[in-house]
C-alpha cells in the first residue's frame, strides 16, 4: 500500500488451495491480487475461486501471472511510460512478469520483443519508442548484450534482467548475469529471471516521474 505496488504471491512451491487463500485475502484487504510463477493448476483454481464474484481475473499463461481486481478497486494511472524489451521471444515469460507489475501500478507499458544484438538493426528500428520511455527494462539471455547496448543509446535509466534462456557454458543465466555486472555502460541489474523485481523497480521510478510531473 505504501509503495502503490501489489504484494506478489509467488505460486511456485505452493498448492493451488494455498494460492487461492492468499489471493482471496489480498483482494479482501487491498482490492487486488497479483500471482506470479503460476502454472495451469494454480490458474484454474484461482479462476474457479472468483467465478461467483464480481472480481476480474486476468491471466498471462506464458508469463505465469494472474491478476485479480475487485469491482470496486480504483485502478491507478501514472503519467509515466515504461518500455520493456527482450533479446529473444523466449525471454517473454520474464518480461511478461515485469509487465504485470508495471501495469498494476498504472504506468503506460510497451513490450517490444525479439530485438537482440544478433540482428541489431531490429533494435535500431525501435529506438524512437525506447528513447521516449521514462525507464527501460531490458530482458536478455545468452550473454545479455542487449541491455548494455541499449543503455548506451538512451537518456533514461535502464534495468537489465539476465534470463536463463542460454545453454552450454555459462548457461542458465550465469553468463548473462556476469555480462551485465561487467557492463561498461551505466545500468542497474537484478537477479536472474527476476522479472517481478525489475517491474517493481521500474514502477517506483514511474511513480517518481508521475509525482514530479504533478508538482510542476
Image (cartoon, helix red, strand yellow):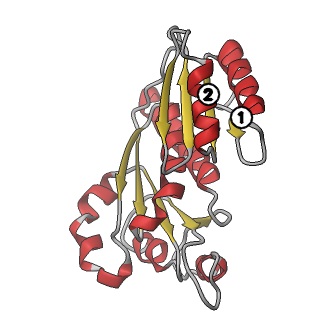
Residue at the spot 77% in from the left edge and 38% down from the top edge: 15
Could you say which is closer to the camera, residue 161 or residue 205?
161
Q: Please, which residue is most extreme toward the bottom here? A: 169
Q: Which residue is mark 1?
A: 16
Residue 214 sits above or below residue 83 on the image? above
Residue 94 sits above or below residue 150 on the image? above
The local crowd at label 1, few if under 14, some if 14 to 19, many if 20 or more residues have their Cα within 10 Å, is many
Residue at the spot 51% in from the left edge and 50% down from the top edge: 63
81 lies left or right of 12: left
Q: Which residue is mark 2?
A: 46
Instruction: Tell me whether the residue at label 1 lies in contact with that at label 2, contact meaning CB atoms closer than 8 angstroms.
Output: yes
Q: Earlier in the sequence, mark 1 or mark 2?
A: 1
Instruction: Give the position of the N terminus as an image quadrant.
Output: top right
Alpha carbon separation for disc pair 1 and 2:
8 Å
Q: Quadrant of residue 171?
A: bottom right
The local crowd at label 2, few if under 14, some if 14 to 19, many if 20 or more residues have their Cα within 10 Å, is many
Residue at the spot 52% in from the left edge and 8% down from the top edge: 72
- In this view of the protein, can residue 99 be seen by the observer? yes
Residue at the spot 50% in from the left edge and 25% down from the top edge: 57
Amino acid at each position: 500500500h505504501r509503495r502503490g505496488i501489489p504484494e506478489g504471491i509467488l505460486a511456485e512451491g505452493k498448492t493451488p488451495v494455498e494460492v487461492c487463500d492468499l489471493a482471496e485475502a489480498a483482494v479482501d484487504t487491498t482490492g487486488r491480487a497479483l500471482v506470479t510463477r503460476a502454472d495451469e493448476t494454480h490458474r484454474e483454481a484461482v479462476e474457479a475461486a472468483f467465478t461467483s464474484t464480481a472480481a476480474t481475473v486476468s491471466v498471462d499463461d506464458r508469463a505465469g501471472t494472474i491478476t485479480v481486481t475487485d469491482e470496486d478497486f480504483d485502478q491507478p494511472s501514472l503519467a509515466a511510460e515504461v518500455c520493456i524489451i527482450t533479446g529473444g521471444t523466449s525471454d517473454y515469460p520474464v518480461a511478461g512478469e515485469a509487465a504485470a507489475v508495471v501495469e498494476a501500478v498504472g504506468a503506460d507499458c510497451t513490450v517490444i520483443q525479439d530485438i537482440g544484438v544478433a540482428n541489431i538493426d531490429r533494435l535500431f528500428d525501435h529506438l524512437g519508442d525506447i528513447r521516449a520511455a521514462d525507464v527501460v527494462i531490458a530482458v536478455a539471455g545468452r550473454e545479455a548484450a542487449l541491455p548494455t547496448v541499449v543503455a548506451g543509446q538512451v537518456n533514461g535509466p535502464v534495468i537489465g534482467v539476465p534470463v536463463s534462456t542460454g545453454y552450454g557454458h555459462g548457461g542458465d543465466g550465469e553468463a548473462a548475469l556476469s555480462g551485465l555486472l561487467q557492463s561498461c555502460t551505466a545500468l542497474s541489474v537484478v537477479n536472474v529471471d527476476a522479472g517481478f523485481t525489475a517491474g517493481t523497480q521500474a514502477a517506483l521510478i514511474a511513480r517518481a516521474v508521475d509525482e514530479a510531473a504533478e508538482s510542476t
